[in-house]
Structure formats: C-alpha cells, structure tokens
Amino acid sequence: MAKQNMLQKWWQKSTSTQKWLFGIVSCLFLTVLLFTIFYAIETEYKVLFRGLESQEASQIIDWLKQEQVPYQLQGESIVLVPAHLVYDVRLRLAGKGLPKSKNTGFELFDQNPLHTTEFLQQLNYTRALQGELSRTIGYLEGVEKATVHIARPKPSLFQRKQESTTASIVLHIKRGHELSKKSIYGIAYLVSNSVEGLRLEDVSILDQNGHLLFQKESQSNSPSDEHALEIQKNREEYLKNKAQSLLEEIVGKNKAIVRIHLEMDLTETKELKETYNPDSQTVQKETVRTHKSRENPQEGITGVKENLKKTTTNQKQREEFEETKETEYVIDKNVKEVQNKTAICKRLSLALVLDQSLSDRAEAIGRLIQETVGYQNKRGDTFQVTTIPFSQEEQPQPQTLSFIDTHHTIIVFSIKAFLAAFGMLLLTIILLKIFRKPIEKAENTNKKDVIEGIQEKSPVEISDLSLQNTVQQVRKISQENTQDAAALLHQWFEEKS
C-alpha cells in the first residue's frame, strides 16, 4: 500500500513531459518483449512433401509464396513448413490437385472413349493394375514410393508352352528405414496374388540403389525358414549376453569375450494319436435274417402202373425255419493330432577368450561359464578357452553432454532477452538525457518568473523593514501564493548549496 501511494505521488508530481516519456518507453519495452517471446525461439519445421519433381516443387513453392506460408527447401525435392501448418497445408494443396499423382489406377477407365480397340483396353488395364499396386505398396511402413512393371505375354493358340507373366518392383525406401525379409516376401506375395497368372518365382524386387532384394533363387527362403533362423540367432544372443554379463561382474569390463554357436533342430513334427475305449460299446447296426423252407414226401417212380394205381394215403410235408441275427458295435475312438514346434538344441559350441592376467583363474571361470550356458558333454558340445594379452587401448568413453549442450535453447533465449532488456534500458537513459535539459531549462525559467512576480508584489524593500515586519510579510505572501513560495525556497536552497 505504501508503494502504491509513493507511485501515485510520483505520478502527480511528474510533469506532462515526463508522463509522455514514461508512456513511450513503456510501449517500446512491451513491443521488444513480445518480439523476443514470439520470434526469439526458432520455429520447428517438418516435411511437407519429399521426392517431388522439379516442376511440382516449383508449383508448390509458388502457392506457398502466394499464401504467405513460411517454408524451407532441402535439396530440390523436399519442402518443409512449420510443424503446426503441415496438415492444413497438405489439405489445401490437395484441393488444388498438388502434388499430382503419377500412379494412375482404375480411374483411368473413367475417361475411356467409346471406340477403343481390344489392345488398348488390355494396355490400359495393365497400366491401371500397375498404378494400384504402386499405391498400395507405397502405403507400407518404410516405403516412400514404389514402381511396378508387369509384363503380360500375348496368349497364342499355336504355342505349346506359353510364356509366363513376370513382374518387377522398384522400392524407394525411406532414409533410416530397413525392410525385413518378411516384409519383402509379403510384397512379392501381394503382387503375385494380384496379377492373374503371375507366380511367386517370377517376381523380382530391387531398391532405389539397384540392390536385389527378391529373386527366383530366393523363393526357397520362405517365412518359416526366416523364422527358424531368427529363433536360432535370438537363442545364441540370449546365451551370449547371459555369459558376458556374468564375466563382467567377475573380472570386469574388457577382460573377457564369449561367443556361442548353436546347432538346432527346428523341424516341425506332426503326430497323430488314436485311442480306443473298449468298455464303451454302442450298437451301430443290427441285421436279422429269416429263412423258411418246405420239403414234400418222396413220390414213387413215374410209370403206367403207378399212374393207374391210386393212392389214398396222405403224407405230411416237412418244414425248416432258420433265423440269423447280426449286430455291429462302435467303440469310442479319440483322434488327436499333435504338432511339435519346440526348438531342440542338438549341439553347442562355446568359445571363451580371457585376458592373460586371468590365466591362473581360466579353468574355474570356464567351468562357471559352462554351467551358465547349459553345456552338456553327452550331447557332443565343445568348449575352448584361450588366454591372450588384450589391447590396452582406452575404449572411447561415451560423450557426456555439458550443461550448455543440454540447455542450449534456454540459454540462447535468455541471452536474447537480456540483450533486449539492456537495449531498452540504454534507450531509456538516452531519452532521459535528451529530454532532461529542456525540462530543467523550463523549470528554471518558471522559477525566475515566480521570483520576479514576488518581488513585484512586494513594494517594501526588505532591507528597510524590521525582522518582525519581514516575517509577517513573507508569511502573508506565502499563504496567498503557496506554489510560488515553494519555488522561491527551492531556489534559495540551490543557491546556498
């Protein structure tokens, strides 16, 4: 509260010139401060488009200049804009049709004329298919763009062996990315299944540097083989790190090296198991057969006498009845297919190299490492330990960043802010010196006028009056003209000093 009252008194005592000067200096200080805050820190730029042709890059830059969008160029094909404007600028340029896509897909048939030959239709279909595949591959992670060429031979009825369709793919891989074997195989598989009559072995893939990534001979490297090799490498790396960490804790760093090689059985086995339950029987089919036959009594010999002779005796017929019953039972059966994918280690080779200073402890360290990695003599594992003098060259220590490197941005901003504040202070001092002389001159002029006015208002000379009359006259004049009396006293003090 006391400071506020002091400021109010200072403001009231200040002259109009001092008030105007204070306002101008305050406005300049705020302007410089805002400029420092918004422009002292460098704007972060991100890639807007890369891989542009010179003509397309020129059109995009002309549009950015017209819209007053800040930009930067890296080389001839990379355009950068402020990070917060990347997506907005991309959408606005897409509305203008920039950049123009060179991979024309099936929209090629939207402008198909009415009169088109069959050859042109087949050619346009091949072009559209190439464009669609190029787009699809370009969307994959790590691929900047792709170019697909498809060669489709013309079918003929007079050839016994038809030539097969082939495809060639050129991949432009992004800087800092590397495509795995599985990804390359997936691209080849995608193209082979998208083109009619195209076999996987007829696909070739290259990168932008001309390195062959996939060819006919590489088709044997199926994803399963790559997966098996990856399992073996991971197992070897795991055991090596396990042994190396133990060695570093015992003998220290740069005193021992361990290497491990595994021979693994990574074949997948399938086993079919069938189990029967004899106690559980279920009737599946039951068949009943019935056989019935009749047999007449034996008759006499056919002849004249027999025909003439009448027989009155009745003889009974003999009947036979036979019944057969067949029943089929079903026994419970369980069929189980077991697929074994467990990687089995067939043989382990272990090599250990120790510094010569550890030769007296080499045997003990070797046994410890054998137990760590699971060494088995019965399995045919091999172990070799060697002691040699290691190189005494100092290993390059990782460079530690200093305080200036880690806080570079803050330090630069602080220096700029300090320079801006120092400049404002210097400007204020200069302005005060410029305006101070006219102000003092005006105040001195006012004081002289006041003194002359007082002397005119006092017709009685002071030297002739008594001390009492003088005091009374001064008191009366000071009560009537307070400001003039204060100026007069101020001038007297300056003269005495």
Image (tube, rainbow, N blue to C red):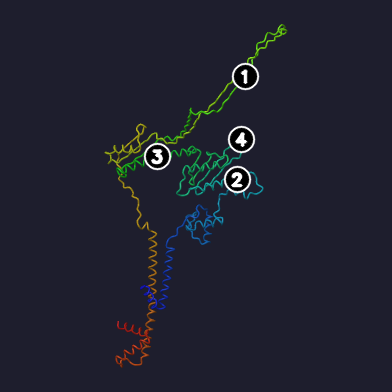
Mark 1 or 2: the one toward you: 1
The mark that comes first in sequence, 4 or 3, is 4
Residue 125 - label:
2
The residue nearer to you, when weighing 324 against 5, is: 324
Looking at the picture, does residue 71 appear above or below residue 474?
above
Q: Tell me: 138 left or right of 318.
A: left
Question: Residue 30, position in %: x, y?
Answer: 42, 68
Q: Residues within 10 Å of mark 1 (few under 14, many from 20)?
A: few
Image quarter (top left, top right, bottom left or bottom right) of the C terminus:
bottom left
Count of numbered badges drawn on the protein: 4
Identified by mark 1, the residue type is: Lys
Q: Label 1, label 3: how many angstroms apart (C-alpha)?
A: 79 Å
* Tag shown at residue 292: 1
For badge 3, the amino acid type reads Arg
Q: Residue under label 3, please give it.
A: 235
Q: Given the image, on which type of amino acid does mark 2 rest?
A: Tyr
Q: Which residue is mark 4?
A: 159
Residue 299: x and y in percent read 67, 10
With respect to residue 78, does 21 lie above or below?
below
Q: In which quadrant of the rendered view does residue 38 lie?
A: bottom left
Q: In terms of sequence position, does the residue under pointer 4 or pointer 1 come before the other?
A: 4
The residue at 65%/46% (across/down) is 116
Kindly state the secondary structure of the residue where label 2 is placed: helix
- Label 1 residue SS: strand
Q: For marks 4 and 3, give the one nearer the viewer.
A: 3
C-alpha span from label 4 to label 1 = 72 Å
For the N terminus, the image quarter is bottom left
Q: In 3D space, how far apart are the residues under numbered discs 1 and 2 (Cα atoms)? A: 79 Å
Image quadrant of residue 254? Answer: top left
